[in-house]
Image (tube, rainbow, N blue to C red):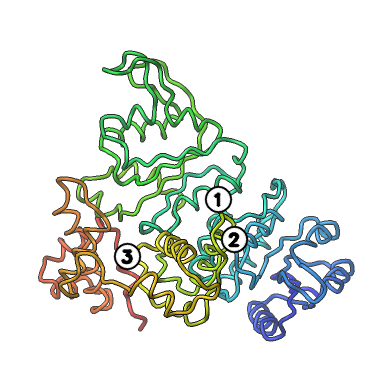
Amino acid sequence: MSSKRGTVLLVEDDAAIATVIIAALEDEGYSADRCSSIENRDRLLRDGHYDVMLTDVILEDGDGLATLDEVKSLAPSLPVIVLSAQNTLDTAVRASDNEAFEYFPKPFDLDELLSAVRQAIGQSKEGRASPEKPGDGMPLVGRSQAMQSVYRMITRVLRNDLTVLITGESGTGKELVAEAIHELGSRRTGPFVAVNTAAIPSDLIESELFGHEKGAFTGAIAQAIGKFEQANGGTLFLDEIGDMPADAQTRLLRALQSGSIRRVGGRQEIAVDVRIVAATNRDLIPHIAAGGFREDLYYRLNVVPIELPPLRERSQDIRDLAAHFLATAAEEGLPPHKLTSDAIAALESRSWRGNVRELRNVMYRVALMAREELIDARTLTDIIGEDRPAPGNAGGDGIAGALMLWLAENRPSHGSVYHSALAAFERPLIEHALSETGGNQLRAAKLLGINRNTLRKRIGELSVDPDRFIRPV
């Protein structure tokens, strides 16, 4: 079987999914064969030539990922795209470790799959490294589509040292993502050093990051090694980077640009080999507009962005997360417990403003206080109480409540509260106007009651994409 565009082998035991994929491939001009077992897969690979293979993980006669070594022996240069309903970080990492060209959790976007097929056929995998397989203990839990995007981004940065910026609300697990990037990546044998830049007094943060020489300042009675040197050969995790003082931002930018640091009070440039992973719960764009964060540092850090979804946007993960935390609590000596379906439904209906951290704390409290092994919704509510309104929003909903909640969550730095709040609320106003006018900037400016040139300027400064609001004719 041949085709000018290429030939594809699909290994999929779900007939309905296979039919859709085959039809889409053939519509694009590819030739495609399909089988549903490892045995038939190997037979087809021995008898014919294929440009790319798409494979499910769980097949009729075994694990499609675990047997990829057999595929490599039969077709060493064949790109493999993994499709899986086993949507965990472990599966994504296994696919990466087995040198899969791409990994798609089910359900997937068909257009994205076809794009990956085109890229796989057009690219060679020759020379890609084969890393050691990490341990089975995965630091992140969740099978939702929102988390699949996170898993895929993590696997894409494991074999390189690109700088990563993790964003998300407090409690979403930003440090866990940073740890996963380190523990599963090529720097796993080096140190992982975490520093919360918001917890260090502004007059000490440079010493904390870069170290200091004896006598550099009052109280510097001995030389001190900073976090950059401590992390040499490994990963430096800079948490709450949005709260870093301006002077420290300047020195951090210089260190990232030069690959070297200078201790406070020192003259010698010290080369450091560290991977930077930064995180923030702030929206840095309005923070930049308000003068609270350096724009050039933002672009230096934001090489690979990973956005963590709040728990309210991945409520289907709450069942797995709650079970995980109860099991962990039991391993640590608390009584074992299980949740009834109505208890799980009660958890899923809560707002979880503290996100995964709040859920973890609640599950530990339940594990400590529940008398029965099986916990129903009534017992759960007795222990943790009813869901409460957001802090600062007790007087009602609306713009004032949203503003109070935004201020509580983002904590703008002293002197930037006014401009940070204006920038944060200006973006949705502009996006609303563009949406209402189908992306027509002149009409949007009239709707807002501002000059068109002013609107254009603010669109650029706030990084709003007006094209995505244009309606098809």
Q: Is residue 415 above or below residue 374?
A: above
* Location of residue 18 (image quadrant): bottom right
Residue 470, given in percent of the width and then of the height, sits at 32, 75
Which residue is drawn at the image coordinates 53% and 57% (left, top)? 153
* Screen quadrant of the N terminus: bottom right
User: Which numbered tag is attached to residue 180?
Assistant: 1
Q: Which residue is mark 2?
A: 89
Whole-percent x, y for residue 279 in the image = 40, 49
Specify the quadrant that holds the C terminus: bottom left
The residue shown at (47%, 62%) is 368
User: In whole angstroms, how far apart are the C-alphas of marks 2 and 1?
Assistant: 10 Å
Mark 1 element type:
helix
Front: mark 3 or 1? 1
Q: Residues within 10 Å of mark 1 (few under 14, many from 20)?
A: many
Asked if 422 appears above or below 164 in the picture, the reply is below
76 left or right of 237 in image? right
Specify the amino acid type for callout 3. Answer: Asp
Say if residue 426 shows up in the picture.
Answer: no
Looking at marks 3 and 1 on the same chain, the residue that comes earlier in the sequence is marked by 1
Q: Position of residue 21 (x, y in %)?
A: 66, 79
* Pick the front one: 117 or 166: 166
Identify the disc placed on residue 465. 3
Q: Secondary structure at mark 2?
A: helix
Q: Which comes before the other along the chain, label 2 or label 1? A: 2
Q: Are marks 2 and 1 in contact (CB under 8 Å)?
A: yes
Residue drawn at x 36%, y 56% as measured from the top left: 170
Q: Is residue 453 visible?
A: yes
- For badge 1, the amino acid type reads Ala
